[in-house]
Amino acid sequence: MSADPMPEPTNQPQDPIDLLIAIERASDVPVRPECVEGMAIVPPQPDNEHNHAAGELYFQLRSAGFHTAGFGNGYRAGPKGGRTQALVIPDFYVQHREPSEVDEAYRKAHRGWYPVELLALAGEITSSNHETDTGPKYRTYAAAGVPVYVLVHREEGRAYAFSQPEGSAYAEKTEIAFGRPLRLPAPYPALDTGFLVR
């Protein structure tokens, strides 16, 4: 009687993309998990107020002529040919340009995730997990070199524009109370936050 050979254990860490796919398959409801700072995160289902805010800010950017503004795409941060470091899905964004054939090949190779280098601006609207947007996602976008990070903090009633990434932080910060215009770095328009006032 002979036994099947035992596979050699590997010390290769699991690609976060595989982990997120497993989470999606195991969930009873549709989810779109993300991975930041080595943690898999399943964001809460957004409420109407969240989606309205993201849609309004996307519309303002698009109306100002930023035709690469969008929502729904996922972005992968990690060295070319190297291990995935983060997988993020901004609530709204502006890309530097339309994805090229190379970007689409990258997305296919990384199972639905575009290169984070496409992002010129990433925006997040806080939900019940606002600590994720103010901590790990802030650091992830900065470390990935995303030039502008817009954060709408519904719990605080404030909006922020961070720019000039340096390491895992941003050197510049603009902060306003809802109802005032949020000035973004050039070439972006100031964003009207009046619709956020409750």
Image (cartoon, rainbow, N blue to C red):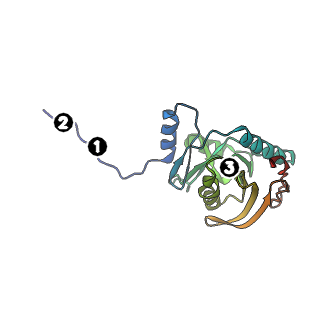
Q: Position of residue 78 (x, y in %)?
A: 56, 55
Q: Position of residue 127 (x, y in %)?
A: 66, 47
Residue on which the image places disc 3: 126
How far apart are the alpha carbons under marks 2 and 1?
12 Å
Q: Is residue 125 above or below residue 148?
A: above
Q: Amino acid at mark 3?
A: Thr
**Of the pair 92 and 111, the residue shown nearer to us:** 92
The residue lying at 34 percent from left, 50 percent from top is: 10
Q: Position of residue 50 (x, y in %)?
A: 72, 43
In x, y percent, where is residue 135?
A: 61, 58
Q: Is residue 143 visible?
A: yes
Q: Quadrant of the N terminus?
A: top left
Q: Which residue is mark 1?
A: 7
- Which residue ends up furthest to the front in the rendered image? 198
- Which element type, helix, strand or loop, lies under badge 3? loop
Q: Which residue is mark 2?
A: 3
Q: Are marks 3 and 1 in contact (CB under 8 Å)?
A: no
Q: Are marks 2 and 3 in contact (CB under 8 Å)?
A: no
